[in-house]
């Protein structure tokens, strides 16, 4: 789960990391009032959770009311890489001499957190990592102890940060690790951490991603998530309501299955047999009939879908429950909206086949056959 | 023969009084697994699934000689449950629980380097030696006895591939689900090493998926150390970057690491054929054993 920049900055500021003065606004008047109070020049920054906002026209530096109005009118309401901009952050423009990068993330290969510092801030750090890996100093941290003070200093010295600000940057890094640790961070990043002409450091951007699985013990952040849950696709919002793992894709063959690996495989097979997957939908383990019916409703709601392949290999999911759910969902239609191909295997599949109303669906015995049939139907539907 | 689990394994089920814990303890016993105890704080002295329940794993080890635990504890408490099993001197702990916070697993990962206990999972279906015993939630009836070792990051994909194998009369020595999380105990390299050293395993199936670099590391290991023929499968070829495909670990990062292409080419370079479909994986295994 990602916090918005304004939320992450609030969390960082509360922990004592210096941040520029800023205010949130959602209309032109709000932007003008905020700019007036902060004092020009200010930056007007779109609050959407995508990288590269600046390049995409989501960040403008403005000197006066006229420019601020123009920026507000163009940014608020714009579509930025598929996300609708509802709010902007109006922020004091910092006069900087240097841009650094500091971040904490989980190194999954090592199974340990890693602290990173670079003097090449202000640009995409993943590009720096690829082109010039030496430019990022890394320090792995023992998660059961925490970051030793010397590790923060070492990372800062190894990165070649100017001595005049080394102490302050170490202190920011230490605080950032503490936050990451206390708040169940997945990533915590400041890029850029600006250095001013009088050798002060200030967090000009803030990224804080939280481990979804830990939200149960981070009530304050869970509340922020609810607030941040803006936009996204209509169907993805519906999937949230139904509590499905769902990803919408571009194709026209709808896919429903149980278990992430098997659903991914079903997508890959649709592609392999010349079709295009419309979505990833995992009903999870042990789904009962109503959940199965919801899954069909979900995929039918996608106008791009021309056919559906329903592939269940039951472990803890039972074939009879799946069949009941499919019947339930389809019997309410006078005419089935899109052809459905069903393949049932594993726990109670025979019971499922007895229950399944075969007038409403096409049954196939193997995964490969089911996918090929659904791809054929999708091609016919498109024609 | 087999690896990690057989009919001598003495199992304690952590969380045996919960719905899933009880159901699967019974299923395991029905399959022939020697479940000797349960461990649930505050429920000591009771009985569940026909075995005695203890308050702590330590007691289950002392009283019933348990050497392996299977963990069905809710995610908020599962990290602690894994620590308890590691600190009780067990040989093996299998964590079925999905959704354990990653930072908890990082601490567990550190502890694993200090103890002799092996961890399988979390967020995994467990493991099975067909005809002898199973630890976890795998449906026993699709497996058959044989000489193919299988290791997989995904549960239901394991069932699919096993089904393809069993239908061809290709039975399994042991099948291990290592789990779909970013931080896991036993990884591909560990499992491959076990199968390579097992005289009864004559071919290996390795089912990977997008995300992380475990498959690439496994490919390098196969190249250097594994003589047993290996066939691979990689799920998620069509996954777009930045979208998490269900499993916490199954994501292609923005910088392009963790892609299916990178994994498939690493495996091919190590001489491992990768099937486009589960059926093709079975084809390769059939050729190996012909």
Image (cartoon, grey):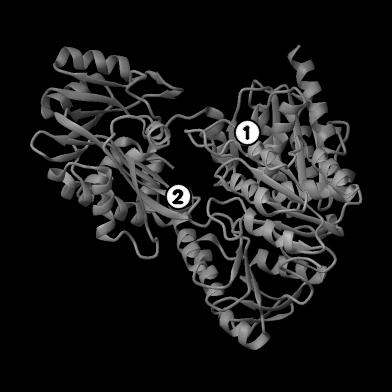
Q: Residue at x 25, y 59 (%)?
A: A149
Across and down, in percent, residue B133 comes to 78, 68
Q: How many marks?
A: 2
Subunit that carries the residue with mark 1: B
Relative to A157, is B84 on the left or the right?
right
**Quadrant assignment, res B231:** top right
For residue A238, the mark is none
Residue at the image point whose x is 66% and y is 45% from the top: B208
How would you rate the neighbour count of disc 1 (Cα within 10 Å): few for under 14, some for 14-19, many for 20 or more?
Answer: some
Residue drawn at 30 percent across, 55 percent down: A178
Residue A164, image x and y in percent? 12, 44
- Dot 2: element: strand
Q: Is residue B153 visible?
A: no
- The image quadrant where one finds the N terminus of chain B is bottom right
Q: Residue B283 in the image: x percent, y percent?
A: 85, 41
Which residue is drawn at the image coordinates 54% and 77% (left, top)? B41
Q: Is residue A165 above or below residue B53?
A: above
Crowding at dot 2, Cα within 10 Å, few <14 / some 14-19 / many 20+, comes out as some
The chain ID associated with circle 2 is A
Relative vertical location of residue A94 with respect to residue A261 in this rendering, above or below: above
Residue extending farthest to the bottom is B63
Q: Is residue A70 left or right of residue A364?
A: left
Tell me, yes or no, whether dots 2 and 1 are on the same chain: no
Closer to us: B219 or A92: B219
| Residue under pointer 2 | A107
Secondary structure beneath disc 1?
helix
Residue A255 position within the rendered picture, expressed as x and y whole percent measured from the top left: 70, 33
Q: Quadrant of residue A55?
A: top left
How far apart, in angstroms, are the residues tagged by discs 2 and 1?
21 Å
Horizontal relation, residue B67 to residue B78: left or right: right
Residue named by callout 1 = B261
């Amino acid at each position: 789960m990602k916090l918005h920049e304004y939320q992450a900055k609030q969390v960082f500021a509360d922990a004592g990391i210096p941040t520029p003065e800023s205010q949130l606004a959602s209309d032109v008047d709000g932007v003008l009032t905020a700019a007036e109070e902060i004092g020009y020049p200010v930056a007007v920054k779109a609050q959407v959770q995508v990288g590269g906002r600046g390049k995409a026209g989501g960040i403008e530096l403005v000197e006066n009311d006229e420019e601020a109005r123009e920026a507000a009118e163009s940014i608020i309401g714009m579509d930025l890489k598929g996300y609708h901009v509802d709010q902007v952050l109006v922020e004091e423009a910092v006069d900087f001499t240097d841009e650094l990068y500091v971040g904490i993330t989980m190194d999954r290969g090592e199974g340990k957190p890693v602290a990173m510092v670079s003097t090449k801030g202000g640009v995409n750090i993943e590009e720096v990592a690829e082109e010039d890996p030496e430019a990022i100093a890394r320090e792995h941290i023992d998660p059961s102890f925490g970051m030793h003070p010397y590790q923060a200093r070492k990372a800062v010295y190894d990165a070649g940060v100017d001595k005049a600000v080394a102490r302050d940057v170490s202190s920011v890094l230490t605080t950032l690790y503490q936050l990451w640790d206390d708040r169940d961070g997945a990533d915590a990043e400041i890029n850029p951490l600006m250095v001013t002409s009088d050798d002060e450091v200030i967090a000009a951007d803030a990224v804080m991603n939280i481990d979804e699985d830990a939200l149960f013990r981070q009530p304050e952040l869970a509340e922020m998530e609810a607030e941040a849950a803006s936009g996204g696709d209509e169907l993805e919002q519906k999937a949230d309501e139904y509590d499905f793992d769902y990803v919408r894709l571009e194709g026209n063959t709808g896919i429903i299955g149980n278990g992430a690996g098997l659903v991914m495989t079903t997508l890959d097979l649709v592609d392999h047999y010349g079709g295009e997957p419309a979505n990833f939908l995992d009903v999870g383990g042990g789904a009962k009939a109503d959940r199965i019916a919801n899954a069909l409703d979900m995929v039918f709601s996608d106008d791009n879908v021309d056919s559906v392949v329903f592939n269940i290999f039951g472990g803890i999911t039972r074939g009879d429950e799946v069949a009941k759910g499919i019947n339930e969902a389809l019997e309410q239609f006078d005419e089935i909206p899109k052809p459905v191909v069903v393949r049932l295997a594993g726990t109670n599949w025979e019971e499922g086949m007895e229950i399944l109303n075969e007038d409403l669906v096409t049954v196939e015995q193997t995964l490969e056959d089911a996918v090929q049939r659904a791809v054929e139907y999708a091609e016919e539907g498109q024609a | 023969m087999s690896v990690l689990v057989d009919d001598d394994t003495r199992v304690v089920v952590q969380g045996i009084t919960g719905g899933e814990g009880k159901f699967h303890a019974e299923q395991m016993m029905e399959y022939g697994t020697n479940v000797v105890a349960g461990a649930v704080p505050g429920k000591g002295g009771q009985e569940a699934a026909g075995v005695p329940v203890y308050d702590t794993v330590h007691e289950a080890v002392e009283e019933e000689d348990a050497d392996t635990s299977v963990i069905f504890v809710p995610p908020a408490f599962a990290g602690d449950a894994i620590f308890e099993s590691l600190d009780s001197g067990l040989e093996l702990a299998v964590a079925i629980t999905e959704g354990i916070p990653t930072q908890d697993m990082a601490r567990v990962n550190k502890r694993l380097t200090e103890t002799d206990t092996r961890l399988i999972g979390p967020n995994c279906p467990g493991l099975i030696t067909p005809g002898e015993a199973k630890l976890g939630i795998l449906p026993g009836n699709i497996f058959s006895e044989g000489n193919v070792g299988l290791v997989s990051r995904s549960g239901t994909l394991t069932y699919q591939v096993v089904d393809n194998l069993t239908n061809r009369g290709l039975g399994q020595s042991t099948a291990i689900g290592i789990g779909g999380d970013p931080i896991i105990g036993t990884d591909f390299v560990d499992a491959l090493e076990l199968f390579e050293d097992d005289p009864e395993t004559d071919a290996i199936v390795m089912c990977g998926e997008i995300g992380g670099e475990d498959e690439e590391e496994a490919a390098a290991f196969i190249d250097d150390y594994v003589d047993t023929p290996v066939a691979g499968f990689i799920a998620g070829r069509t996954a777009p970057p930045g979208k998490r495909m269900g499993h916490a670990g199954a994501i292609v990062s923005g910088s392009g690491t963790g892609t299916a292409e990178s994994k498939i080419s690493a495996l091919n370079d190590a001489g491992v054929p990768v099937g486009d479909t589960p059926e093709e994986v079975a084809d390769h295994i059939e050729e190996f054993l012909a």
